[in-house]
Image: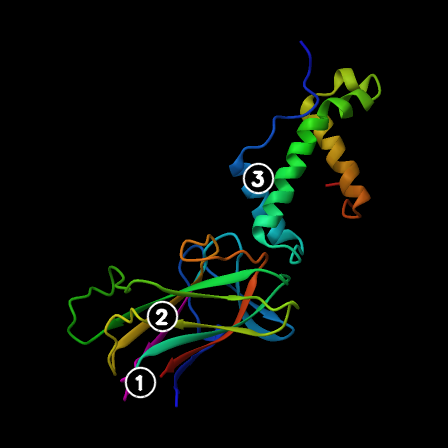
């Protein structure tokens, strides 16, 4: 059975939850709520569209042994570190 | 000329058990933080001043935590109880229908803006009544557009008579 590279695309409720969390956690004041939601939708869609490409880029043995969730978390941790908000000791 | 009938401050507010505006200070200024995603409420209690006769409005002074675009929407409701009214105050509430108004946020976060809510539904308020005023940010936009992100800090509220 082929392991899916990422978890399933988010539904509207989940995307709305991201919007709410993001507004509370970060300064996103330069855009309004609908614009922020549109960016979340686009990001989730991009992840879904590029999931296979990301999986292809992963090296073995990680690609074959990691779960979809583990691969997604890896992506997130790398992105958070690049954004400067992941502490050295992790979360 | 309009008359200020009451000044409602963050420090004098009280709150429901859940979904309440958070009391905070912003640059040393007391403020009530209204969330952008969930409707949150604050209450004020007062005795309706003598001489009340004209149309009432609520002038809400606020700043935004981070938003520099979009609008905020507020709702205000009045509960006015006269002595001997058939209202069981230890068992329920008796607010009139909500009044609402909105305004565009300033282009710079931290700049003051005011929204005036006309209290068309004022629960037949009369001088001497026991009164509660409920103020909430209509974050989910049921009464109008609220699309500014981040907290809205209410710094002061004026009960104004026309």
Compared to residue A91, the image places residue A74 above or below, namely: above
Q: Which residue is mark 3?
A: A15
Circle 1 sits in a helix, a strand or a loop, which is it?
loop
Quarter of image, res B29: bottom right
Marks 2 & 1, CB-CB < 8 Å contact: no
Work out whether residue B69 or residue B31 is closer to the camera in this orientation and state it: B69
Work out whether residue B28 or residue B121 is closer to the camera in this orientation and state it: B121
Chosen colour scheme: rainbow
Q: Which residue is mark 1?
A: B49
The answer to whether any part of residue A43 appears in the image is: yes
Circle 2 sits in a helix, a strand or a loop, which is it?
strand
Q: Which mark is residue B33?
A: none
Question: What percent of the width, then of the height, locates residue B76?
Answer: 38, 66
Q: Are marks 3 and 2 on the same chain?
A: no
Circle 1 residues within 10 Å: few <14, some 14–19, many ≥20: few
Question: What percent of the width, then of the height, locates residue B2?
Answer: 39, 87
- How far, Cα to Cα, is label 3 from label 1? 48 Å
Q: Which residue is mark 2?
A: B133
């Amino acid at each position: 059975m082929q392991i899916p590279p990422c978890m399933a695309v988010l539904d509207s409720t989940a995307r709305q939850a991201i919007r709410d969390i993001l507004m509370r956690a970060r300064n996103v004041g330069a855009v309004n709520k609908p614009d922020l939601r549109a960016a979340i939708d686009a990001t989730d869609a991009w992840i879904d569209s590029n999931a296979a490409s990301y999986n292809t880029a992963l090296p073995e043995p990680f690609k074959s042994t990691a779960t979809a969730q583990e691969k997604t978390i890896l992506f997130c941790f790398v992105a958070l570190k690049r954004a400067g908000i992941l502490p050295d000791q992790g979360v | 000329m309009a008359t200020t009938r009451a000044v409602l401050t963050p420090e004098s507010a009280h709150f429901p058990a859940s979904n309440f505006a958070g009391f905070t200070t912003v640059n040393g200024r007391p403020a009530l933080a209204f969330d952008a995603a969930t409707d949150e409420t604050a209450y004020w209690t007062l005795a309706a001043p003598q001489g009340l006769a004209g149309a009432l409005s609520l002038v809400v002074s606020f700043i935004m935590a981070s938003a520099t675009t979009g609008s905020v929407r507020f709702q205000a409701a009045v509960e006015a109880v006269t002595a001997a009214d058939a209202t069981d105050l230890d068992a329920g509430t008796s607010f009139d229908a909500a009044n609402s108004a909105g305004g565009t946020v300033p282009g710079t976060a931290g700049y003051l803006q005011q929204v005036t809510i006309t209290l068309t539904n004022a629960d037949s308020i009369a001088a001497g009544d026991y009164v509660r005023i409920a103020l909430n940010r209509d974050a989910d936009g049921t009464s109008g557009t609220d699309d500014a992100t981040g907290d809205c800090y209410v710094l002061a509220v004026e009960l104004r008579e026309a």
